[in-house]
Amino acid sequence: MVVKIDYVSDIACPWCAVGLGGLEQAIKKIGDAFEVEVHFQPFELNPDMPPGGQDVFEHLTQKYGKTVDQVRATQNDIKARAAAVGYPFHPEGRKHVYNTFNAHRLLHWAGTEHGAQAQHRLKHELLITYFQLAVDLDDVQNVLDAVNRAGLDVSRAAKILASDEFTTEVRAQQRKYTSMGIQSVPSIIINDKYLLQGAQPAEAFEQALRQVAAESENN
C-alpha cells in the first residue's frame, strides 16, 4: 500500500523545513508498515522578490509589522524547532530572502524525470543551501552545488536554469494549489483527500498517516 503526500511548500519557508523534518521522522517510525510517497509541490512566499533579494530582518519587520528584536526571537524559536527535527540552521540565521522560482523549476524536473526520492533529496539539499549554509540563492553555482549533493545531473540542471524550461508547468501547479484555497505553507495533502496545515510534530503526522492507511485498507 502507498500513502501519497503532496507537500506544498517553499524552500524560503523555515516552517516548511520544520514540518518536513517532522514528516521524515514520522515516516521513519512507520517503517515497513506501508509506503509513504512524498511529492513536493510549489508555493512561492515572495514571488515578486527581485534579484539580489532583501535583508531578512528588513523583510520580516515590514511583512509582519514587528520589531527586529521580536523577529529575532521568533527566528530563534524556529531555529530550535528545526534543529530538533534534523534541519540545523546557520548559527547566525539566513541573511537574505530570495526569489525561489528557479528552485521550484528544478524540483519539478527532479520529480518528473527522476522520481519522488530524487526530488526529496533535492528538496533537502535546497533547504540546507538556504537555511544551513545561508548562501546567495541567486548565485547559480550555489543551486547547482545542491543538485550535485542530491546526486542529480548538474549539466542538465544548468541548462534548465539558463532557459525557461518547466516555467509553464510550475506556474500551473501553483495555480492549482492556490485555487484549492491554500494560502499558507506547509500544507500537506494526503491521498488527494485530507489536508494538514502547518509544521506538525512527528507524532501528529504519524497518527494521520496510520489513520489514512487503515481507512484505505478497509475500503
Image (tube, rainbow, N blue to C red):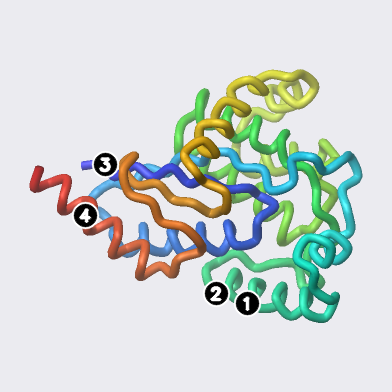
Quarter location, residue 5: top left
Q: Nearer the viewer, mark 4 or mark 1?
A: 1
N-terminal label among 3 and 2: 3
Instruction: Compare marks 3 and 1 and give the one earlier in the sequence.
Output: 3
Question: Quick check: 120 left or right of 54?
Answer: left
- Mark 1 lies on residue: 80
Q: Amino acid at mark 2?
A: Ala
Q: Nearer the viewer, residue 99 or 34?
A: 99
Toward which corner of the image does residue 76 lie, by quadrant?
bottom right
Tell me the distance, in whole angstroms, between the alpha carbons under discs 2 and 1: 6 Å
Q: CA distance from mark 4 to mark 2?
A: 25 Å
Relative to 82, say whether 3 is above or below.
Answer: above
Percent x, y of residue 187: 49, 51
Identity, as a three-letter code, of the amino acid under mark 1: Ala
Given residues 186 and 136, the one toward you in this image is 186
Report helix, strand or loop for mark 3.
strand
Whether pointer 2 and pointer 1 mark residues with C-beta atoms closer than 8 Å, the reply is yes
What is the spatial separation of the Cα atoms under label 4 and label 3, in whole angstroms?
10 Å
Q: Between marks 4 and 1, how big is the CA–CA gap?
A: 30 Å
Q: Earlier in the sequence, mark 4 or mark 1?
A: 4
The image position of residue 68, as x and y in percent, is 85, 75
Q: Quadrant of residue 104?
A: top right
Q: Is residue 178 left or right of residue 64?
A: left
The residue sitting at 23% across, 49% down in the picture is 34
As drawn, is 23 to the left or to the right of 77? left
Check disc 3 and report the residue beneath it: 2
Residue denoted by label 4: 33
- In percent of width and height, residue 19 lies at 51, 61
Is residue 145 shown above or below 14? above
